[in-house]
Amino acid sequence: MYKRLLDYNDGEELELVVLIKNSQLRHTKKGKLYLAMSFSDSSGEIRGNFWDANDQDAATFNAGTIVELDGKREEYQGQPQIKIYSLRVVGPEEGYDLRQFIKSAPEKIVDMKEEINQYVFEILNPTWNRIVRFLLKKWDKRFFEFPAGKSNHHAVRGGLAYHTVSMLRDAKGLADNYSQINRSLLYAGCILHDMGKVLELTGPAATQYTTEGNLIGHLVLIDEQIMLAAQQLKIDLESEDLLLLRHMVLSHHGKFEYGSPKLPALLEAELLHRIDDLDASVYAITNALQHTRPGNFTDNIMSQGGRKFYRPKTDESLGKAHKLE
């Protein structure tokens, strides 16, 4: 049976074709150069260090390159890694497709699309409904293919849609519990809040930030998309409905230090920020725990303030959960 990257156990040697997801040239304490790398295929991602590297190695083995990896799986400080014996760039004539090496969200795109459309039916405000439908149609392919981030959370094919579906489920629970919540506004905010990432990121393979992403960012990019949609749909650009929707996306990072140009000033905007933060945190912590042996702590999770989280020796719920990355 064909084995994938994460199918190997500690101590097993491997020789297989993988994608370089990340590659950074660094210095050891003694000043020697090495490449801190991560490799991926459809089973997930694992790290490895390419020792005694040089500038030419960094140029050859960069992110997005398909390589033949010869090495051995080991454990270092409770975490799996690959001891690299050798790397060889795989040429296009060898017939490999980049999509073979990309981890996908644990739910099917067709199912997520159907579920999101069901929530759209519950957006009863005509302005918000029309804009949401317009932008979902405009960015359909990217929205359901792109990750929600470069590395912190939902960094998989379909991750943006998966993040959105998860947030909508949380939003439904809150709206069912608190009758004062404007369900339509909260659902519209959930669907649109990160849609600017279809312009901020390059796509699911070896994800990088675009020039627009680096210079403008997804909050402002989606606000611009909302205004362009309103113009094309001949919606009053000074209407309160449009203003409320724009506030939802512009304030969803919640704090100035998190890049939010405005602080939430609507109940639904505050909830959108908290749901977004909750879902991203649950994903990041769960993903780290899934790559940690029972009875050990995770690596420091930078998105969680550098904290480590413990994986209990027995945890049936985590064991039954979808494998994330």
Image (cartoon, rainbow, N blue to C red):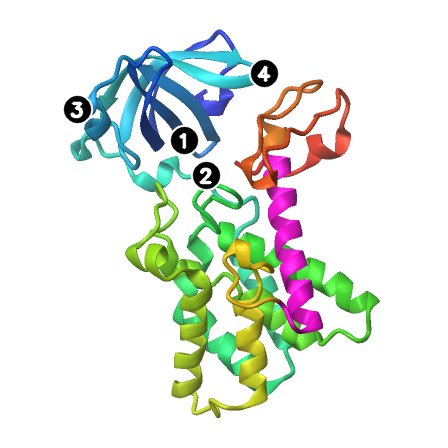
Q: Between 91 and 254, which is closer to the camera in this rendering?
A: 254
- Circle 1 SS class: strand
User: In this figure, which residue is indicated by the disc labeled 2?
Assistant: 103
| Earlier-in-chain disc, 2 versus 3 | 3
Position of residue 290 measured from the top left corner of the image (x, y, whole percent): 61, 29
Quarter the N terminus occupies:
top left
Separation (CA) of disc 2 from disc 3: 28 Å
Label disc, if present, on residue 78 of the rendered structure: 4
Q: Is residue 133 above or below residue 45?
A: below
Separation (CA) of disc 2 from disc 4: 23 Å
| Earlier-in-chain disc, 4 versus 1 | 1
For residue 28, side relative to residue 89 (left or right): right
Marks 2/1 in contact by CB < 8 Å: the verdict is: yes
Label disc, if present, on residue 133 of the rendered structure: none
User: In this figure, which residue is indicated by the disc labeled 1?
Assistant: 40
In the image, is residue 290 part of the stretch drawn in magenta? no
For residue 94, side relative to residue 271 (left or right): left
Q: Give me the residue at 69% from left, 59% from top.
A: 169
| Earlier-in-chain disc, 2 versus 4 | 4
Q: What secondary structure do most residues of the magenta stretch adopt?
A: helix
Q: In this rendering, which labeled residue sits more in front, label 1 or label 3?
A: 3
